[in-house]
Amino acid sequence: MPWYLYLAFKQLFPTGRRFPFFTFMSGLGVAVGVMLLVVSTSVMGGFSYEIRRMIVDTQGEIQVVAAGTIDNADEIIARISKVPGVVAATPYAQGTVMLEYRRRPVFPLIQGVDLSRVNRVIPFNRYMLAGSLDNLDDDSVILSSQLAASLGAMVGSKVDIFSPLLLEKSNGDEIQLPRTVRIAGIFEIGHQQLDRSVVIASIRLMQELYGLKDSVHGINVRLAPGADEFKTAAALNAVLPDDRRALTWFESNADFQHIIRFEKYMVAFLLMFIVVVAALSIMSSLLISVVRKTREIGLLGALGGNPRQIAACFCAQGLFLGLAGTAVGLLLAWLMLTFRDQIVQVLARLTVGEEVFRQFYLFAKLPSHTVGSDLVFIIIGAIISSTLAGLVPAWRASRLKPVEALRNE
Amino acid sequence: MSNAAVILSAQGLRKDYLSGDRRIAVLRGVDLEVKAGESVSIRGESGSGKSTLLHLFSGLDAPDAGVVTWAGTPAQPERRALFLGMVFQSFYLIPELDALQNVLMAGRMLGRVGEPERARAASMLAKVGLAERAEHLPSQLSGGERQRVAVARALMNRPQLLLADEPTGNLDEQTGDAVIELLLDLCRETQTALVLVTHNAAHAAKTGRQLFLHEGVLR
Ligand SMILES: Nc1ncnc2c1ncn2[C@@H]1O[C@H](COP(=O)(O)OP(=O)(O)OP(=O)(O)O)[C@@H](O)[C@H]1O
Ligand SMILES: [Mg+2]
């Protein structure tokens, strides 16, 4: 090991000192900064990732939509099924209705699905809490969990559905009876908004409620794992008639995705300053050390060291603090992300209580998704800024003339 | 003695310092030749330029005129670690390193830290009477002990020249006497040329040649 690296190491971990306080404090700043950056970008990334997963699970990667309704769904499905990357496609019709149970009205979104093929696109069975998709027919619906809970309805209960069409008709003189259906099952996706407001029905029931005859609102498309959704969407648009458009999950939820992405970068930008402050504190403690060690630096010159080596000695200390701080920060971030549910539980219990917390929260659990490129960016940023922080003191040290440093008695 | 090699030679050394807009000539033409195994003492008033002169000898500072040669070739910073050792009034040990590592530091500067160098550092410590204190930090040593570690470090690389700038300035009389004895003994033993700057007439009297720096010239 060159002498300047040895000396750098010894200045960080002096012989006979059991706890190197300076090293610990300087490294800690970097570690905290790195930890917060990794945790925050992971959690923000987790929101994006979970939302994507839910959208894709409930709509497929791509939706084919039209300005109005689509009346030749089977023909279009036959056409898009031939496009490479497409595994399955299923039509849907959706709209808001009034649903009443024991004189309590709610206004959920009904999603009408094609019972014969929906399972190949949307894995409903994975989300069923009670009952089963197999029990769904044209006289029954499946409720989302919180909707069912708020109504007090269970599998087997009967509910009344009033469609806009029905309400329109009853403007006339005749009294229209609501459509009475059975609850065939209850599902839960894990997304507060969906679990509060979605009802699944057969597409024929939905067509009847909305007076759609045989037409549908759109087609959900499932892609093969690994297929590029944007490229496939472009390929689909090439075979679709001009008034039909294939939208990826991202495009149909673009506003929301952009907000999340913006928030993620905003938070990262703000937290970045912790790393900058940590680097500044490394710089100031190394500068103090250069001033304090003026005479020893002179001596190193007298012993034969050249200015570049002396600079390297201080630079190496900055680099080491950056590396060690980053490593510890990554470890802390991993611990925090691993135990995030426990941490959130404790925090929630200490502040507003778990129930309140969950209500205002999009997800049942705190999501986390760490993106490799974010990690690389954080690691490189932390190491570069602490090395730069070492550069200023190193430059100061290398400019000290041994003669003047030694005269400093 | 007279046919021994010239280790240090200085010819016409001049050094000026600017003090405000005035130019102060500190050294005004110093000539000196020191041969292997020789010991020379330099005395002079405070501020007469003794430290300045040693810095020129060591190549840490450049003269405004004149030349310094080491064993016949011009002084070069890259050769310093191997050619000469220095001892200072304030010891200048590295506080984070124990006594042995401080001595070994001289070898480290040359990239030599193998077993032979460790053994050499340990034997140097033994020679200055600190074999038992190898693992002590400078802060755990007395002033005299620290200066002895500094002497061991200065001689670690078997230099041909030892420059000592008031090595007893921070020590009490008895301790100072002992350090000077040690310095002279070790240099005599290894035929190392010694230039000793001191204020102490008794210490100067023990060297082979006694010089005074006065008004910028050596006499
Ligand atoms: N960098 C400098 N700038 C201006 N003047 C300087 C500088 N270095 C030394 N001097 C002056 O040069 C003169 C000689 O200084 P030097 O340290 O060599 O004296 P010295 O003989 O070693 O004194 P002492 O016995 O007190 O150690 C002093 O007057 C000092 O003020
Ligand atoms: Mg002096």
Image: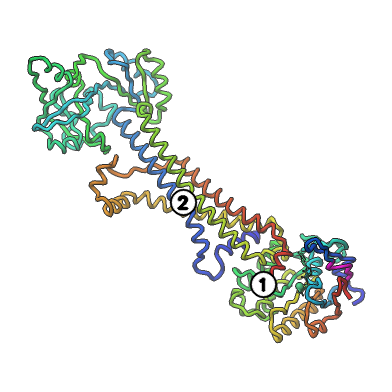
For disc 1, does the CB lie below 8 Å from ligand 2?
no
Give x and y (percent) for residue A215.
Answer: 24, 15
Q: Which residue is mark 2?
A: A33
Which color mode does the image show?
Answer: rainbow
How many numbered marks appear?
Answer: 2
Where is residue B37, by image quadrant? bottom right
Q: Amino acid at mark 2?
A: Gly
Asked if residue B211 lies in the magenta stretch, the reply is no
Q: Residue A298: x percent and y percent?
A: 70, 65
Residue at 36% across, 32% down: A256
For label 1, the residue is B119
Q: B58 or B128, which lies in front?
A: B58
Q: Is residue B162 visible?
A: no
Using the image, determine if residue A139 lies above or below residue A371. above
Helix, strand or loop under label 1: helix
Percent of width and height locating residue B33? 88, 71
Q: Which corner quadrant of the image does residue B48 belong to?
A: bottom right
- Crowdedness near tag 2: few (<14), some (14–19) or many (≥20) residues, C-alpha within 10 Å: many
Q: What is the crowding at mark 1: few (fewer than 14 residues within 10 Å), some, or many (at least 20)?
A: some
Quadrant (top left, top right, bottom left, bottom right) of the C terminus of chain A? bottom right
Horizontal side of A281 relative to A264 (left or right) equals right
Stretch in magenta = B25-34
Disc 2, ligand 1: is the CB inside 8 Å? Answer: no
Tell me the amino acid under the disc marked 1: Ala
Q: Residue at 41%, 19% (x, y): give it.
A: A235
Alpha carbon of mark 1 to alpha carbon of mark 2: how far? 46 Å
Q: What secondary structure is the stretch in magenta mostly built from? A: strand
> Which of the labelled discs sits on residue A297, or is there none?
none
Q: Chain of mark 1?
A: B
